[in-house]
Image (cartoon, rainbow, N blue to C red):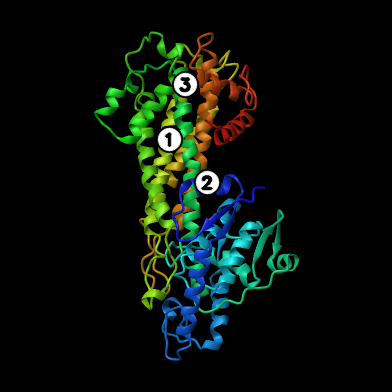
Amino acid sequence: MSYNYLPLDKSRLDFEQVKNLLDYDQHISITFDAHDRINKCREYLNKKMADPNSVYYGINTGFGFLQNVRIKNEQIEKLQDNLLKSHACGMGKEVPAVIVKLMLMLKVKSLSYGYSGVQIDTVKRLMNMFNNDVLPVIYEQGSLGASGDLAPLSHLSLPLIGLGEVYYKGERRKVEDVWKELHWDNIRLQSKEGLALINGTQFMSAYGLYCLKKSEQLIRMADLICALSYEAFDCITEPLAECIQTIRPYKGQMETAKNIRGYLNGSAIANHRKEQVQDPYSFRCVPQVHGATKDVFDNILDVFLTEINSVTDNPNVFPDDDIIVSGGNFHGQPLALRLDFLSIAMSELANISERRIYQLISGQRGLPLFLVKDPGLNSGFMIPQYTAAGIVSENKQLCTPASVDSISSSNNQEDHVSMGANAATKCLRVINNVEKVLAIELLSAAQALDFRRPMQTSEVLEELHATFRKVVSFNEEDRVLHDDMMKAVAFVISYQF
């Protein structure tokens, strides 16, 4: 385990830092500046609360439609506890541990700016939970993506007051038992802290960052696997020419063509004379299709980096300006739209990949039908294409936008919501599906390439093929392909460039 710390404060957090946090098991810590800003904000709020005539939404009032109900000072702590308990209404599947860790980090990051009014002990406990792998049990369903991710963030925060369940040392346990083992006391929440904890977009943001991290790997693998398919299907290289890309100069398109030209460099297969004049769109238009996904990825990453470097709870406390403002930074609309777009863009990588799989098994270009010796006796790679087709069809259904929907809540006080949480969870399902389809293409392309021997492809693609063959052997005759497909998925996820 690495004990390098990721410092959190008002400084901008970038994508590489987020990826390193997950890949190298780093810990988190707020800086001295963040510590001082948090304390300053809390002290300011305490002074405001000392005024018996002060009324601030969510600080000494009820929440949502109950905003006009005044809460006595002696009931403030109970108000915070009640908020966490009443809003912990998640259902469905459990949120993956890696996303829970991101949620914890992002909540600390948001609080570190010193505009949320929390006490320093609350932030320290969240950090300690992250650093000790004490991960709250959180459920996928329950957030509308506005007023923050209320239900999932309530489950994230319940352990602070000794309630709920957590995973610790690989076991699901009651919080009170883990706290005894760690010699941790419950946090006594002060005014505003309940809303500071459960208002925010950390559920959507964590899913989005994780999806972007996975997408980055898949986008790279899509180009590389496509290049292998290019060789296996004996495609012509003219559509990759730089001059074609420069007269329609989308960044992603030019990058894709350059990547595949590089992967094919030095290939005897690519350089020998072809009989066909054109190839199908699933090969010829790869720069345009893969490139469009890359351009969308860049836009979405920019939005999510803005989001995780923002304060998204409500109300916000500004000590230097002597104001407490209730606004709508918790609304997930920017994320909801982009999560839907990421689903669509990534699903297209699978759509075009499945078409290449179909071409490879079709018995064209000197390849045997279904990429197997003795077709008829052997079905070969007939059914992996069925599986890929079923998966891309499922993705088309999942890509129906969640962000076009809104259902009024809180007695019509919260009358427009983003549904970004639904966009987030289904986006991950789409991306997991893309992994599977690309894995089936890799399996098919590697099999097809072996029928091109003794001709050689490029050094890069020969290395890819040889490395893959250490995991999955050539298919001489029918065998249980599920095992090969799952090995291929693991390969796609982990292959290093």
Outermost residue to the left: 247
Mark 1, mark 3: which one is toward the viewer?
1
Give the labeled residue for mark 3. 360
Q: Dot 3: within a 10 Å radius of its alpha carbon, few (fewer than 14), some, or many (20 or more) residues?
A: many
Mark-to-mark CA distance, 1 and 3: 17 Å
Disc with the residue nearer the chain's start (2 vs 1): 2
Most extreme residue toward the bottom is: 52
Q: Residue 118: in sight, yes or no?
A: yes
Q: Nearer the viewer, residue 48 or 341?
A: 48
Q: Amino acid at mark 2?
A: Lys
Could you say where residue 443 lies in the image, as x and y percent from the top left?
Answer: 55, 26
Q: Nearer the viewer, residue 261 or 387?
A: 261
Task: Point out the tag, 3 or 2, that comes first from the N-terminus.
Answer: 2
Does 437 sit above or below residue 397? above
Q: Dot 2 corresponds to which residue?
A: 19
Please give the residue where the numbered disc 1 appears in the rendered image.
Answer: 349
- Residue 472 spot, x, y in % from top left: 62, 25
Q: Determine crowd level at label 2: few under 14, some 14-19, many 20+ residues with C-alpha closer than 10 A.
A: some
